[in-house]
């Protein structure tokens, strides 16, 4: 049985109807990637003045998923690897970018990055997505 993917606005990462959500809004870029701006709230801290790594992983996963969707296919994450490079501070102005790297039969590979205004990468992810 094939699962049905429905967009209801309740998504934690991008849903406009989720009061606790991140409210990310991705735009398609000319190179085929997607990008969003984000300033994380202090409520997403793990340690004091550092945004929780699970939230960063969620943001990266969402960026890759949006890049996959922008390619006109439905797919779900089946593997996610995150490399944390520098801490993310609450209120920091960030740019999130996701892009598809390869497609083989029912699998797509993607990458995503979170960068600060200084251009330095805060975290980078790779993922494998399974087409439905």
Image (tube, grey):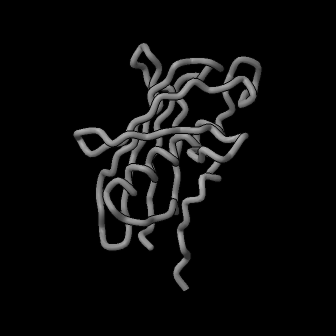
Q: Is residue 35 above or below residue 69?
A: above
Residue at point 71%, 17% (across, down): 49
Of residues 9 and 104, the one nearer the viewer is 9
Q: Residue 27: x percent and y percent?
A: 38, 40
Residue at point 67%, 27% (across, down): 51
Q: Residue 64: x percent and y percent?
A: 44, 48
Which image quarter holds the N terminus?
bottom right
Residue at point 52%, 63% (across, down): 78
When asked about the image quadrant of residue 103, the answer is bottom left
Residue 131 relative to residue 30: left or right: right
Q: Is residue 62 above or below residue 94?
A: below
Q: Residue 96: x percent and y percent?
A: 45, 33
Of residues 93 and 51, the one nearer the viewer is 93
Which image quarter holds the C terminus?
bottom left
Q: Residue 101: x percent and y percent?
A: 30, 51
The residue lying furthest to the left in this view is 30
Residue at point 53%, 42% (across, down): 82
Q: How many marks?
A: 0
Of residues 41 and 108, the one nearer the viewer is 41
When asked about the image quadrant of residue 128, the answer is bottom left
The residue lying furthest to the bottom in this view is 1
When asked about the image quadrant of residue 40, the answer is top right
The residue lying furthest to the top in this view is 118
């Amino acid at each position: 049985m094939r699962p049905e993917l429905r967009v209801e606005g309740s998504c934690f990462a991008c849903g406009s109807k989720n009061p606790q959500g991140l409210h990310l809004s991705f735009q398609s870029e000319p190179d085929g990637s997607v990008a969003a701006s984000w300033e994380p709230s202090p409520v997403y801290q793990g340690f004091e003045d550092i945004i929780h790594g699970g939230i960063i992983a969620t943001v990266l996963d969402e960026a890759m998923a949006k890049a996959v969707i922008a390619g006109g296919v439905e797919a779900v994450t089946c593997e996610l690897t995150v490399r944390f490079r520098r801490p993310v501070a609450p209120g920091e102005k960030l740019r999130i970018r996701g892009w598809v790297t390869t497609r083989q039969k029912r699998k797509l590979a993607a990458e995503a990055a979170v960068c600060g205004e200084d251009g330095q990468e805060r975290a980078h992810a790779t993922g494998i997505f399974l087409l439905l």
